Amino acid sequence: QVQFVESGGGLVQPGGSLRLSCAASGFTFSSYAMSWYRQAPGKERELVAAVRSTGGRTNYYNSVKDRFTISRDNAKNTVYLQMHSLKPEDTAVYYCNAGWSGGIFDSWGQGTQVTVSS
């Protein structure tokens, strides 16, 4: 079945960096766009970034543009999110799923917690 395993989160000070990873399985990874989402306490899950199946095109939510970079390794069935200049408002649980503008699969991983705080 479809599975997503996110990792790489943690506690970081404002201005710091983190690199998230998401290992996917159960579908033909290289055929799908992949995306990262986040959900802060009391808020709905929102799209953060997306990358096309070949990695040739990316898209970012306005508040993370120029700070986050999404990439993928189709040989490893893994998508990454490099985050720089982190802000307290980036604090959330981060998830990945297939798709360009919305999660295609109903099954979501456990997510990885990112906490930005001094």
Image (spheres, rainbow, N blue to C red):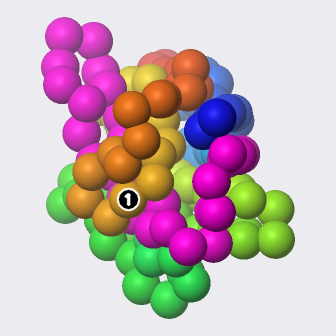
**Rendered image quadrant of residue 2:** top right
Between residues 9 and 53, which one lies in front from this camera angle?
53
Q: Which of 89 and 110 is in front in this view?
A: 110
Residue 64 x, y percent position in the rendering: 31, 56
Q: In which quarter of the image is the N terminus?
A: top right
**Residue 59, image x and y in percent?**
32, 72
- Quick check: 61 above or below 38? below
Please report the residue visible at 38 percent of the width from the left and 59 percent of the height from the top: 99
Kindly give the residue lying farthest to the front in the view shown.
Answer: 1
Q: Is residue 20 left or right of residue 59?
A: right
Q: In this view, does 81 lie to the left or right of 74?
A: left
Q: Is residue 43 above or below residue 29?
A: above
Say whether residue 84 is visible.
Answer: no
In the rendered image, residue 101, in percent from the top left (x then y), is placed at 25, 59
Residue at 19% of width from left, 60% of height from top? Answer: 62
Q: Is residue 60 left or right of residue 98?
A: left
Residue drawn at point x = 42 percent, y = 85 percent: 57
User: What's the residue type where badge 1 is placed?
Assistant: Gly
Q: Residue furthest bottom?
A: 56
* Residue drawn where x is 39% and y is 25% of the image: 92
The residue that disc 1 covers is: 99
Instruction: Examine the structure image and report whether residue 49 is included in the region drawn in magenta.
Output: yes
Residue 49: tell me if it is visible: yes
Circle 1: element type? loop
Q: Which of 22 and 32 is in front in this view?
A: 32
Pointer 1 local density, CA inside 10 Å: few below 14, some 14–19, many at least 20: some
| Residue 89 magenta | no
Span of residues in magenta = 23-50
Q: Position of residue 45 (x, y in %)?
A: 25, 30
